[in-house]
Image (tube, rainbow, N blue to C red):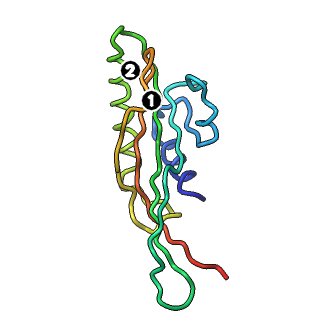
Amino acid sequence: MSLVTEMIARLQAIDPSPFALIEGAVEFASIDKVPPAVPAAYVFIKNEAAEENSRATGKVLQRAEHDIAVVIITSNVSDATGAAAFDDIEALKVKVRGALVGFVPESSSGDPLEYVSGQILRFRSGTVWFETVFAAASYIEEQS
C-alpha cells in the first residue's frame, strides 16, 4: 500500500466523515472549476527528495522524504463575504490534522506523519481551495 493510499484510507475512517469525497491526484487534475461534490479532499505526493546513500559499501540505501498534499475544497455561499466558507475550511483543517498528525503509515520508515504547512490555493465565489502538507519518510534500497 502506498503512502497516499494509506492517508486516503485514514481520512475515509473519520467518523462521521466530513467529506463528500476523498480522492487522489488523477481526480484532482481533472477538476475544472469545482469538484463533483464538496467538501472534498485530494491526496497526492507534492514533492520527494532523497538523502545520499548511507552505506559505504554494498547495496544503496537512501532515506527519502515525501511531502504529501491534502487539498481541501469546500463551498459555502451563505454570506456575501465568503467568511462562511473560510469557517468551514478551518473546521476541515482541524479534522484532517487530527486524523493525520502522528499517524504512522505502514509504507513509511516508521516515523509518524508531521504537519509541514498550509496555504490557500484559490478562493472564488464562495469556494475555497486549501492545501495542507504533511511530511513522511521511507527508505529506498537497491534491489539487485
Identify whether 81 is placed above or below 133: above
- Name the residue rendered at 39%, 60% in the picture: 112
Give the residue furthest to the front.
52
Q: Position of residue 49 (x, y in %)?
A: 47, 62
Q: Residues within 10 Å of mark 1 (few under 14, many from 20)?
A: many
Q: State left or right for residue 141 relative to residue 94.
A: right
Classify mark 1: helix, strand or loop: strand
Q: Are marks 1 and 2 in contact (CB under 8 Å)?
A: no
Note whether 114 is above or below 56 in the view shown.
above
Q: Quadrant of the N terminus?
A: bottom right
* Residue annotated with mark 1: 129
- Element under disc 2: helix
The quadrant the C terminus occupies is: bottom right
**Residue type of the residue flagged with mark 2:** Ala
Height in image: 124 above or below 72?
A: above
- Residue picked out by circle 2: 85
